[in-house]
Image (spheres, rainbow, N blue to C red):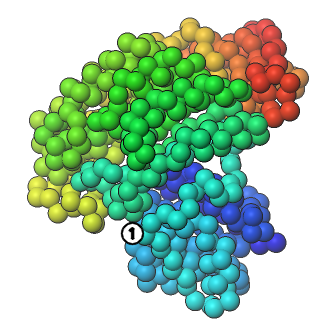
Amino acid sequence: MRTYEVVTYGCQMNVHDSERIQGVLEAAGYVAAAPGNQADVVVFNTCAVRENADNRLYGNLGHLAPVKGAHPGMQIAVGGCMAQKDRQVVVEKAPWVDVVFGTNNLGSLPVLLERARIQQEAQVEILESLERFPSTLPTRRDSAYAAWVSISVGCNNTCTFCIVPSLRGKEMDRRPGDILAEIQALVAEGVQEITLLGQNVNSYGVEFGDRGAFAKLLRACGDVDGLERVRFTSPHPAAFTDDVIAAMAETPNVMPSLHMPLQSGSDRVLKAMRRSYRSEKFLGILDRVRAAMPHAAITTDIIVGFPGETEEDFQATLDVVRASRFAAAFTFQYSIRPGTPAATMPDQVPREVVQERYERLVDLVGEISWAENKALVGQVVEVMFAEGEGRKDEATSRMSGRARDNRLVHVRVPEEPALRPRPGDFAEVEITYAAPHHLNADAGLISLRRAAGPAAASPRGRQLSIQPRN
């Protein structure tokens, strides 16, 4: 059997697409390469949002050229947003690539690989529009207990820094019944947490004429027996409505975590970005979310150095960050993306100025995140353990998981196998230490609830009482 490896760059949508790529390869008879072994087929699922993704791809392709020369029959495929954007450029820059495929034809990969092998020439196939919704393809998930569920693809926004709409097309929504059927099938397989995915999830339903469809979908998820946790990403502030806040607050299995992209705190820059909201509206949303869910953790995306950004604009961003009290922020230095309106705007900010502002922003975000995490010391939280084991040292044995608000928690766990958590299990723990990007629970487990699994009699699993270890 031929083996494969998939290398993923970019957002959660790309991660979900990679699971579909793995699924179609395995359905065609490929098997995942063992760790440390050279795969017969290496697939790069690419991102086109930031410049460093380009550099990483072509750097890795250059590294693989001699590897491929030493392994007859090895194939390299490039898919995703950069493949959709660059198309023939990929094989011109890296002629040893065998297949280039786009965001709209993931399912074609096995056929393209076979055609490239037989014809001994690169195959480039880029579909301009989606012919088959990705969720109808087979999948190989990285987790047995958590899954992505795509509710829409594409984007109708026209942000001047973003090339995604031209690569993934206009928004297409799935019917609610299809989404819920997929969720129910996943839960039957043992999945306990799902994340609803879309380029702009809260505009879901516009295509079929129901602007309240996303809030209704969240509430419907609350009726799925055995579904413990529901998350979603990413919403757009301009379309974020109070019915969604109410659905989050009133549906027990919808988690109190929200990723709300800010991009800039300057109204002038937001206008230049074509972000159809202003800082006052953004902060108002956060106020209403926290009024409904006082313990919600809110994260964000911020771009530093957008063309024309002044020091005054940047200070406005810092002011909004201070007021927002984000649990975490994904911060990015603006980079020119050919094909976007921002690429040709005047007053591009010098790289050294962008770097200096970026460092100030990162310092502020870290300071706030740390303070927000410190406020949780002494509180009891529910953790769902993730695949794999956390770091170990001589003094403690830890496993890692996520709290309901999506914070990362490293938990001291018993050495006894019968009492030790497994991936997918839930535990109540007391937070004993806070760092800027994680929490520790070193007092041990207060209680442990085993993952139900598809064959369990109760959808909520078995409850074990655990005495904390001294």
In the image, what residue occupies the spot 71% across and 84% down?
72
Residues 230 and 30: in front is 230
Mark 1: amino acid? Lys
Q: Is residue 103 left or right of residue 267?
A: right
Percent across and percent down for residue 445 are 73, 15
**Is 175 located above or below residue 202 in the figure?**
below
Q: Residue furthest front?
A: 209
Evaluate whether residue 404 shows in this view.
no
**Is 361 located above or below residue 283 in the figure?**
below
Percent across and percent down for residue 162 are 31, 54
Percent across and percent down for residue 188 are 76, 37
Q: Is residue 305 left or right of residue 286?
A: left
Percent across and percent down for residue 45 are 54, 62
Q: Is residue 29 left or right of residue 10?
A: right
In the image, what residue occupies the spot 80% across and 32% down?
453
> How many residues crowd mark 1 within 10 Å: few (<14), some (14–19), many (20+)?
many
In the image, what residue occupies the spot 64% across and 33% down?
193
> Label 1, on which residue?
85
Secondary structure under tag 1 reads helix
Circle count:
1
Quarter assignment of residue 251: top right
